[in-house]
Image (cartoon, grey):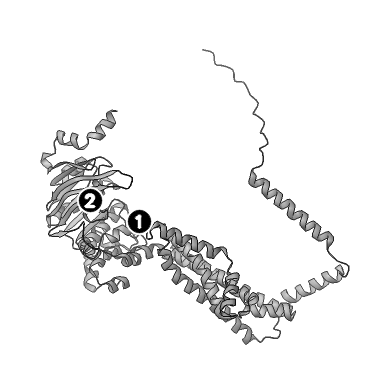
Amino acid sequence: MIAKPLTLTRAPQPQKRPLSRAQRATRLLLLALTAISGYALVTMHTDHLNWATAFASFWHNLQLMIVHPHLGQDSWAALLQAFANTIALAMLTTLLGAFLAFFLALATARPFAPKPLALAMRSLMAVIRAIPTILWVLVYATVIGLGNEAAVVGLTFHSVAYLTKAFAEAMETVPPAKLAALRATGCGFWLTVRHALWPEVRASLLSWTFIRFEINFTNAVAVGAAAGTGGIGYNLFMASAFNFDFQEVGLIVYLLLAFAICLEFVAVRMRKHLTH
Amino acid sequence: MLTIAGLNKTYPNHKRGLEAVNVTFAPGVTAIIGPSGAGKTTLLRSINRLITPESGSVRLGDQEIRTANAKALRKIRHRIGMIFQDYNLIEELAAIDNVLHGCLGGKTWLAGILGHYTAAEQARAYELLAEVGLADFATQRCADLSGGQKQRVGIARALMQSPEVILCDEPIASLDPASTQAVMTLLGDLAKRGIMIIVNLHQVDIARQYADHIVGVNQGRIVFDGPTAGLNDAALAAIYAKEAVAEDA
């Protein structure tokens, strides 16, 4: 039997695929944004602007911030106290949020909650999460007045919704059979939660809580500036937008950076400790 | 004695789990055998009501289990140990902590929530781990144990309940032959101490080797109930009837 000679066939040319609806929408949006930006640039009134002076001033302010950070109108004690306030605000709202979220997650996670309740909880938490934290703080500021109280309630409110979702998802990873094994020994609901669920989700819950603390710290700075609730955010706002004291702005930014680095260091250590 | 009478269970997908099951379990090792999906697990889990049957009766001594209220059910469950195919241990905890879980059902709520164990309970847990050959693994995380070791921790957890009955849901399905022998021998020894052992098995030869009594289940019905010596080819054909037909087809 003679083997058939191999014949080389030309690979079919790849055809240009038509754009999907989403791709077309994205391109259209980018095009529109480019057009708006272009129009804004062209119609900008720059008659009074001296570009050379503007760039020199910008460079000077940047230098003041980065190379010459210094105290301005606030003393070290005042700055550190404001800083401590912001940390306390982030910590308080995170702990409150985590505590409430744990119980709400039990009413949201599928192994524990009946389907209609789980669905209702998920929907409610999604609605709360959809509105940014700052807006919640402003909403509560109009209800209970500007100040730390509005910040505490607003930040906690959003933290609860965020952590409830995260905690419920962590709880849903625990095989129901493990919970059934504890129930089979005669344990009731809370004993099963304490001895079967908690050890399995502890690491995950602590990790989420820490992530939320980082978010709440950032939010606490922002609400200090935007909603006038005090803390280091307020000092930052006053130093930059009112006093134009860029040396103090630089100092505050360095303080925030140092704290962020410390948080990251703690987070890495904590994750290592929890996963080993 | 554990008596089941007229037990029926239908799943939400209309699959018949159990149909008019009548069986009495006596002390010793009773093996429940049958093809996959025959209702072995449903029958076993109906005993401690991890699955709730619609009708019928399950009685341990003079206590009715099927209709017991939540508090009574917890007390009854504490008298019935259970071991699982997938062990169902809390893997993040040490072996000793998992064994101590066995006594939670008998403690006050506060002591249970706080995880407060008496010195006697702790000593008993260590003793049980030694009994199942894991004295040196007491403080080791369960995630780091082998399958056979995990199953023995599961047995120690069940023994911590000082149970009258131990339900075993395919306890050797995930084990190698050596571990299978160790686990089945251990269950046999427990039966000799007066604990009623009810074990779901897929392996007929293992059931013949270790069980005193065999219950054969097929399509949710009891098709054989008798001493191991009575399990002849005709009985096996009845137990695995559908499976045989499916294989022939």
Please identify the quarter of the rendering in which residue A237 is found. bottom right
Q: Are marks 2 and 1 on the same chain?
A: no
User: Which residue is identified by label 2?
Assistant: B44
Residue A45, x across and y down, in percent:
85, 66
Residue B232, x across and y down, in percent:
13, 36
Please identify the quarter of the rendering in which residue B208 is found. top left
**B197 displayed left or right of A240:** left
Please identify the quarter of the rendering in which residue A193 is found. bottom left
Furthest toward the front, the residue is A143
Q: Mark 1: few, some, or many residues within 10 Å (few <14, many ≥20)?
A: some
Residue A176: which numbered mark, if any?
1
Furthest toward the right, the residue is A47
**B190 displayed left or right of B90:** left
Rendered view: A183 above or below A233: above
Residue name at image x 72 percent, y 77 percent: A240
Type of the residue with mark 2: Leu
Between residue B216 and residue B222, name the one nearer to us: B222
Q: Mark 2: few, some, or many residues within 10 Å (few <14, many ≥20)?
A: many
Between residue A118 and residue B77, name the one nearer to us: A118
